[in-house]
């Protein structure tokens, strides 16, 4: 058995309606699945999900997994996310071969990574 690529990335949020609106703006469309226990977005065939977290404080995933979503321009996307209320975590930087990565924290403390990879193509 081997990994077959990104299928779903789920973020815990303390304010589901606000997170749904924020991610709708980030993604450019609303969720395809919208229930009180889970909100799911289709991001060009991949799943970005939101689940409610009853914690008083935002989740801080500093030591967690970094998930990177493909973009056409990591610098511009990073700036747009900051403009929409995210906070900086890792500024865009080239990691080799023209690949650029960046990470922000969404308003709930989740790490949201973006990657520009000129070598990536779906089969």
Image (cartoon, rainbow, N blue to C red):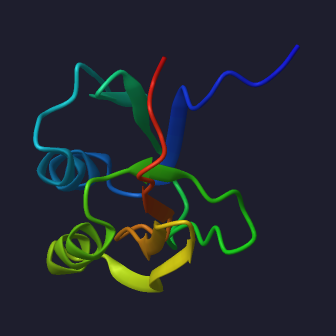
| Nearest to the observer: residue 73 or residue 34 | 73
Please name the residue shown 24% across and 50% down the image.
23
Task: Inspect this view and state whether residue 36 appears.
Answer: no
Q: Specify whether 8 is left or right of 92.
A: right
Please name the residue shown 67% across and 21% down the image.
4
- When the figure is inspected, residue 56 is found, relative to residue 29, above or below; the finding is below
Task: Inspect this view and state whether residue 98 appears.
Answer: yes
Whole-percent x, y for residue 19 in the image: 27, 53
Whole-percent x, y for residue 31 in the image: 21, 28
Whole-percent x, y for residue 32 in the image: 23, 19
| Nearest to the observer: residue 94 or residue 91 | 94
Whole-percent x, y for residue 102 in the image: 45, 73
Please name the residue shown 83% across and 20% down the image.
2
Identify the image quadrant of the N terminus: top right
Please name the residue shown 24% across and 79% down the image.
82
Q: Specify whether 25 is left or right of 13.
A: left
- When the figure is inspected, residue 19 is found, relative to residue 7, above or below; the finding is below
Where residue 49 sits, quadrant-wise, is top left
Q: Specify whether 7 is left or right of 40.
A: right
> How many marks on residues?
0
- When the figure is inspected, residue 27 is found, relative to residue 79, above or below; the finding is above
């Amino acid at each position: 058995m081997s990994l077959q690529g990104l299928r779903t990335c789920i973020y815990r949020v303390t304010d589901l309606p606000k997170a749904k609106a924020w991610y709708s703006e980030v993604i450019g469309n609303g969720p395809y699945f919208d229930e009180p226990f889970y909100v799911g977005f289709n991001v060009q065939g991949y799943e970005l999900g939101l689940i409610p977290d009853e914690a008083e404080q935002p989740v801080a995933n500093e030591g967690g997994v970094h998930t990177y979503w493909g973009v056409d321009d990591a610098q511009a996307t990073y700036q747009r996310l900051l403009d929409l209320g995210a906070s900086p975590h890792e500024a865009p930087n080239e990691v080799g071969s023209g690949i650029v990565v960046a990470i922000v924290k969404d308003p709930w403390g989740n790490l949201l990574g973006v990657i520009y990879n000129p070598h990536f193509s779906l089969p």
